[in-house]
Image: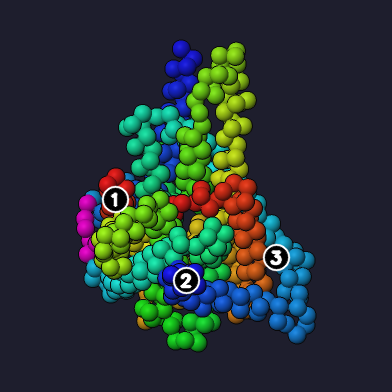
Amino acid sequence: MTRGLGNGILSAIAGLLCLFLIMPTLIVAPISFTQTDFITFPPRGFSTRWYEAFFERPEWYGSLVTSTIVAIATTLLATLLGSMIALGLVRLSRRANRLVSFFFLLPMIVPTIITAAALYSPFAKLGLVATVPGLVLAHTILALPFVVINVSAVAQSMDWRMVNAARSLGASPLTAFRRVTLPVLAPGIAAGAIFAFLTSFDEVVVALFVSGSGATTLPVQMWSGIRFEISPIVAAASCLLLLVSCLLLALFWFLKRK
Amino acid sequence: MPARLRSAGPAILILPGFLLVAGLFVWPVAQLVATSFGDKAGALVHYSKIFTETTYLRVVSRTLLLSAQTALLCVLLGYPLAYQLNRAGRIGKALILVCILIPFWTNLLVRTYGWIILLNPQGVINGLLRQVGLIEGSLPLVYNSTGVLVGMTQIMLPYMVLPLAAVMSRLDPAVMRAARSLGASPLAAFLKVYVPLTLPGVLGGSLLVFMLSLGFFVVPAILGGPRDLLLAQLIEFNINQTLNWPFAAALSTVLLVATVTLYWIGDRFFGLGRLWGAR
């Protein structure tokens, strides 16, 4: 009897906590379809006018395009460099591995406000402020740890004798890499790539410092939207970002199950 | 193959990434730290300002307090949720995981904006409370420290629940059965066996939340009021408004030292590096 009651209370608490976690994320969806010029709840009417506004206004649509380009370029660069690092790390001694891993985790540990402040002067000197290459380089540094972690996890548990077997059976180093190493590492590389894409696509703080009129990302545009323009267009933008997150999460789960 | 040649392999693989991180991250951060000391009036003039002037002391203590409050709230809310996540059936588990992972993967700004919709004076929560008749006007839930704490807790909660649930799942259920069979009541067994065994997870999770909270910028800047300035905002203010780079650099150094020290402690005693597999 008391056990049933205890279970009930615990479930109810967990339910409330779940609501607390998910509500602020999901609330943007109904708000984005409102007909009104301001945010109201419950939303009045149903319209897609704020989505039309999003794709018609160059500052919003343009920032989505910039963010997508930057995120794709960051994913390519971070995945390539990060996978190489992970492949190098497994061949190091335990001690060296720990030290080098720590070095590559640093951008994840250091608060982004410090990274942003530190990058500003050198980027200004190199002419990288408010440019797409500048954003890509900055985001690659932030995304690199996630690729290294994900690829390392697979590389550590991989049976490297398979590569030796392939080599002894006459495969060239390149063939052995392409036919044996790469297929085994593929899930880790894909997971790392998803993390890298999201890290770049969602990043605000460094982008606030490094982007500018030449290249504004969607999160930077949202930042000014939230602060200076209380219009449901921000809800529409939020809902689009939510959609991207859900798609990537589904993809990540699918990869993990495979 | 000679040993020297074999060890050239990893070096070549690591080198491009190393050059990028060293040149565009470690070196600039080192430069920033150096800027904080390079003043004619004395190397430590900016640091003494941070730790003696009331205005700045207040920002530092407010940042520490808010981070501690966030960590505490995350323990109080995260413990029952992790417990339930570990105990629930297949469907319950999936539901809880979805509620944790969707926000976890969604842009910070989306969640922060969601909190504005929920908490503002005309927002969902005030509206509901008015309809039920619990309040007349509206509660000040956002653009103050309450708003920051609520937003920070929601954003940090997954960092507590996921490691904690991992610790709980590794716990051998036979230990609890043994305690019960030796005559402990369910509550006594929980308090004297279960809680102590999960304590490293609680401490590790708290340390992680506390450390990450120290450098938060976006959430306090949007959900806080003009009087709730935190360390990260003060850094941004000194760079973008007053252009006081040396002072901003000193503030950054203080934050940097605190964060790296906490990470080092966490990694050494709680395996923070392993806890922190996800985002």
**Residue at horizontal 62%, vertical 32%?**
B196
- Residue drawn at (64%, 53%) of the image: B265
Task: Looking at the picture, tell me which residue is in the foreground, A109 or B22.
Answer: B22
Q: Give the residue displayed 61% in from the left and 75% down from the top.
A: B30
Position of residue A37 measured from the top left corner of the image (x, y, whole percent): 31, 60
Chain ID, mark 2: B
Q: Tell me: residue B26, above or below residue A245.
A: below
Q: Position of residue A228 (x, y in %)?
A: 43, 67
Magenta-tinted stretch: A46-53
For badge 1, the amino acid type reads Leu
Q: Nearer the viewer, residue B126 or A91?
A: A91
Circle 1: element type: helix
Q: Is residue A109 above or below residue B93?
A: below
* Crowd tier of the residue under label 2, counting other residues whose Cα lies within 10 Å: few below 14, some 14–19, many 20 or above: few
Q: Which residue is mark 2?
A: B2
**Label 3 sits on what residue type?**
Tyr
Report the amino acid beneath label 2: Pro
Measured as percent of width and height from the top left, residue B159 is found at: 49, 48
Please state the chain letter of the residue tagged with numbered disc 3 in the rendered image. B
Is residue A99 at least partly visible in the picture? yes
Contact? badges 2 and 1 (CB < 8 Å): no
Of discs 2 and 1, which sits in the foreground? Answer: 2
Give whichever of A249, A173 is nearer the camera: A173
Does the magenta-highlighted stretch encompass residue B49? no
Which of discs 3 and 2 lies nearer the camera? The answer is: 2
Q: Which residue is mark 3?
A: B56
Whether residue A31 appears in this view of the structure is no
Going from the N terminus, do you reach mark 3 or mark 2 first? 2
- Left or right of B227: which side holds A182? left
To which residue does mark 1 refer? A255
Comparing labels 3 and 1, the label whose residue is closer to the camera: 1
Distance CA(mark 2)–CA(mark 1): 40 Å
